[in-house]
Amino acid sequence: MRQMIIDEITRYVEENIASFHTRRIHSLDNLKLKKILERKNPYLFKAKHVLTAEQIIKGLVDAHISSNEETIFGDWLEGLAIFINGKIFGGKKSSAEGIDLEFDNNNVRYIVSIKSGPNWGNSGQINKMISNFNTARKILRTGNAQLNVIAVNGCCYGRDNHPDKNGIYFKYCGQKFWEFISGDPTLYTKIIKPLGHHAREKNESFMQSYAQMVNKFTFQFTQEFCNESGAIDWEKLIKFNSSAL
């Protein structure tokens, strides 16, 4: 890959990585205690012998962050992949449902569904992706029945040593995915350095928001679900979470 392209990728990452950190903080700002309490299993906390409001709150907030960050960063990496492919192969964001990237290479039209990691979905979600691939193929071949269309499930990290999925689509993960969209077998390591651009400063801002959220929710939880002695009122919490309306 030409150095000029590498420099463009580095600039793109450094100029756009801030949006990932901004969305992380925004996701915390929009959290509501009762909403996340409604979605979690209170029996699990009791079974784990959780005794303090802060333990419950940190468990709730940390679970939200873990799930949400994977989605946010997956979306960000998808944008990076489309940018890189556009610079090298002229690819673009596809207008077809469920297809993230579309590009031509060596007389083949590739349609790509980009996911964060290899274990991204259950059988129903995978079947939906296959259905989207089949629909996109039909649409693309409407004006050109001879068009060679290959479907690819691209995963930004991980590995899959059996990429050919019964001739229906290919699954490229980690190094193979980044090489597939760029032609560079070393790209997957080259994008690491610019991802750390101002990471320490951005993470400090995030941790400030995190600490404030934990403190605020701990106070709210204590007011709502602890008795006068400070113990968790498990019956009240269970009723809030699970009672028939």
Image (cartoon, helix red, strand yellow):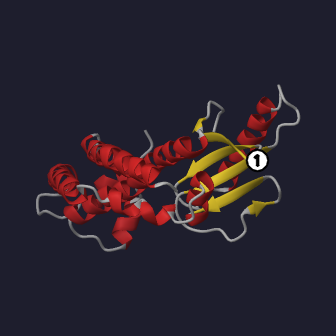
Helix, strand or loop for disc 1:
strand
Q: Which residue appears at 34% of the width and 55% of the height? A: 65
Please count the marks in the image: 1
Q: Give amino acid for label 1.
A: Ile
Q: Is residue 78 visible?
A: yes
Q: Is residue 39 visible?
A: no
On the image, the x and y values in percent for residue 93 come to 57, 36
Query: On screen, 51 above or below 42?
Result: below
Left or right of 224 on screen, residue 106? right
On the image, the x and y values in percent for residue 108 come to 76, 44
Q: Nearer the viewer, residue 36 or 142?
A: 142
Q: Nearer the viewer, residue 85 or 235?
A: 85
Left or right of 110 on screen, residue 52? left
Left or right of 151 on screen, residue 227? left
Mark 1: give few (<14), some (14-19) or many (20+) Cα within 10 Å. Answer: some
Q: Which residue appears at 88% of the width and 32% of the height? A: 145
Q: Which residue appears at 25% of the width and 57% of the height? A: 199
Q: Nearer the viewer, residue 84 or 47?
A: 84
Q: Indicate the quadrant containing the C terminus: top left, top right, bottom left or bottom right.
A: top left
Q: Nearer the viewer, residue 85 or 88?
A: 88
On the image, the x and y values in percent for residue 133 come to 73, 42
Query: On screen, 17 above or below 166?
Result: above
Residue that label 1 marks: 150
Left or right of 21 on screen, residue 241? right
On the image, the x and y values in percent for residue 72 come to 41, 48
Q: Which residue appears at 80% of the width and 52% of the height? A: 168
The outermost residue toward the top is: 143
Query: On screen, 133 above or below 207?
Result: above
